[in-house]
Structures are given as structure tokens and as C-alpha cells.
Image: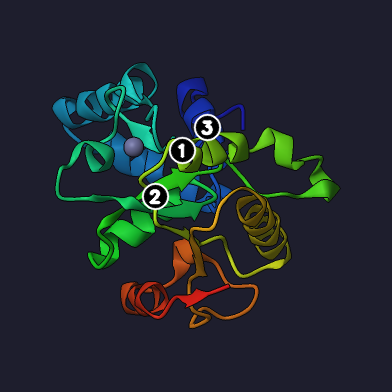
């Protein structure tokens, strides 16, 4: 690799750290960028900087936001009575793309995964229970991935909620294949899973 200029090697290594990006793709990215006008490169660099400087978590639902409260929580047309519980902000994005859900969200920040040392205390379950306890919520939709960790997490939260209150608890329908992933489900499947949700 000594024949390749260091800045190029460095950027290839950086892209290579991204999920699903191998070294061949990283190289293609770098050589593509080299051919772009300076203004394009500067816009990309600015976006990368802004990502860390301006993005924080919504104080209510913990999805990514530019402000204290995200655009969904601040939207008066969204129903605060229905909370859809998801693992990650990218799941919020997946449900938003379906355009069929008009409630709000609660992002747990992961799932219960004892094999990797994540227990319920590391997730924002307490915060969810607090939101429910503060009143006005009529339904909690559990929308974790249909895999073992997602199911374990949903079952744990359902039990906590049932111990605390008598609100309706639903789970998105199993249009999603077992072991599947909300992030990669197409919009129609995900929209159907949401509208076909069932009481648990
Ligand atoms: Zn929010």
C-alpha cells in the first residue's frame, strides 16, 4: 500500500469501518470523491461535522433530533395517546417512511441481549414507564424486531406495563418474517404490520 498516498489510504480505512462496506466499496467511494468538485467534498465534510455537532436525542422519545424535542413529538397532529416502542432511531425512520402511523415513539436504545451484556437497566424502559405514569397514554405498541432479543424485550416491557397500568398493549402483526428486521422491511409490509397490530 506504500504506493498509495496516505490520505487516500486513511479515507479508505474510514469508509471500511461503516456497516456493510467492504474494502472494494471503500476504494470506489474514495476514487469517486476524488473526481468530484471541491464544493461537493466540502458539503459532505460539513454534513459529517454537523452530524455530531447538532444531533442529539429528543427529551421525550429519545429519537435523533436537532432540538430538545423532535419534529414528531412537536407535531400537534401526532397523537400523544399512542406510543410505538422501538429499539433504535433507525426503526423510527422505517415506520415514518410508511406514512401510516400518526402516534409518537419511544426509542429504547437497544434490546435486552444478555449474551452481549445488555440488560433492561441499560435500556430506556424506566423512562417509558414514567411517560405512561404521567397519564394520557391509551395504547403502547411494541415494535421490536421479530427475533429472540426483540421478543424478549417486548415480553419484558409488556409485563412491566401490565404490573403498572391497565392501558392497551399491542404488538405489530407478524407480517415480518421471524428473525427479520424492521430496518430492512419494505414500506407496505411494515405499514401492514402496524395497522394489523394485535392486543397482547
Ligand atoms: Zn421525540
- Looking at the image, which residue is at 46% across and 38% down? 131
Residue 98 percent coordinates (x, y): 28, 67
Q: CA distance from mark 1 to mark 2?
A: 8 Å
Residue 178 percent coordinates (x, y): 63, 78
Residue 80 percent coordinates (x, y): 30, 47
Q: Residue 60 falls in which quadrant of the image?
A: top left
Q: What is the quadrant of the C terminus in the image?
A: bottom right
Residue 10 percent coordinates (x, y): 53, 26
Q: Is residue 89 visible?
A: no
Bin the neighbour count of mark 3 within 10 Å (Cα to Cα): few under 14, some 14-19, many 20 and up. few
Q: Are marks 3 and 2 in contact (CB under 8 Å)?
A: no
Label tally: 3
Bin the neighbour count of mark 1 within 10 Å (Cα to Cα): few under 14, some 14-19, many 20 and up. some
Vertical arrangement, residue 6 with respect to residue 163, above or below: above
Q: Secondary structure at mark 1?
A: helix
Q: Are marks 1 and 2 in contact (CB under 8 Å)?
A: yes
Tell me which numbered mark, 1 or 2, is placed earlier along the sequence: 1
- From the image, tell me which residue sits under label 2: 137
Of 178 and 135, nearer the camera is 135
Q: Secondary structure at mark 3?
A: helix
Q: Residue 45 falls in which quadrant of the image?
A: top left
Of 11 and 67, nearer the camera is 67
- Looking at the image, which residue is at 61% across and 40% down? 125
Q: Secondary structure at mark 2?
A: loop
Of 135 and 70, nearer the camera is 135
Q: CA distance from mark 3 to mark 2?
A: 44 Å
Tell me which numbered mark, 3 or 1, is placed earlier along the sequence: 3
Q: Are marks 3 and 1 in contact (CB under 8 Å)?
A: no
Instruction: Confirm or reject: label 3 Cβ below 8 Å from ligand 1.
Output: no
- From the image, tell me which residue sits under label 1: 131
- From the image, tell me which residue sits under label 3: 14
Amino acid at each position: 500500500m506504500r504506493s498509495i498516498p496516505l490520505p487516500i489510504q486513511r479515507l479508505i480505512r474510514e469508509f471500511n469501518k461503516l456497516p456493510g462496506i467492504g474494502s472494494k466499496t471503500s476504494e470506489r467511494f474514495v476514487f469517486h470523491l476524488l473526481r468530484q468538485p471541491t464544493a461537493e467534498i466540502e458539503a459532505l465534510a460539513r454534513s459529517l461535522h454537523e452530524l455530531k455537532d447538532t444531533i442529539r436525542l429528543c427529551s421525550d422519545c429519545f429519537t435523533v433530533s436537532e432540538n430538545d424535542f423532535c419534529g414528531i413529538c412537536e407535531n400537534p397532529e401526532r397523537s400523544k395517546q399512542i406510543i410505538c416502542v422501538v429499539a433504535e432511531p433507525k426503526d423510527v425512520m422505517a415506520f415514518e417512511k410508511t406514512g401510516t402511523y400518526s402516534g409518537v415513539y419511544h426509542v429504547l436504545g437497544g434490546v435486552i441481549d444478555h449474551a452481549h451484556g445488555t440488560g433492561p437497566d441499560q435500556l430506556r424502559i424506566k423512562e417509558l414507564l414514567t411517560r405512561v405514569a404521567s397519564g394520557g397514554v391509551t395504547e403502547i405498541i411494541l415494535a421490536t424486531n421479530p427475533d429472540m432479543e426483540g421478543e424478549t424485550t417486548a415480553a419484558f416491557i409488556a409485563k412491566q406495563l401490565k404490573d403498572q397500568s391497565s392501558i392497551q398493549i399491542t404488538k405489530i402483526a407478524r407480517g415480518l418474517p421471524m428473525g427479520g428486521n424492521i430496518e430492512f422491511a419494505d414500506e407496505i409490509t411494515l405499514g401492514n404490520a402496524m395497522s394489523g397490530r394485535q392486543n397482547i
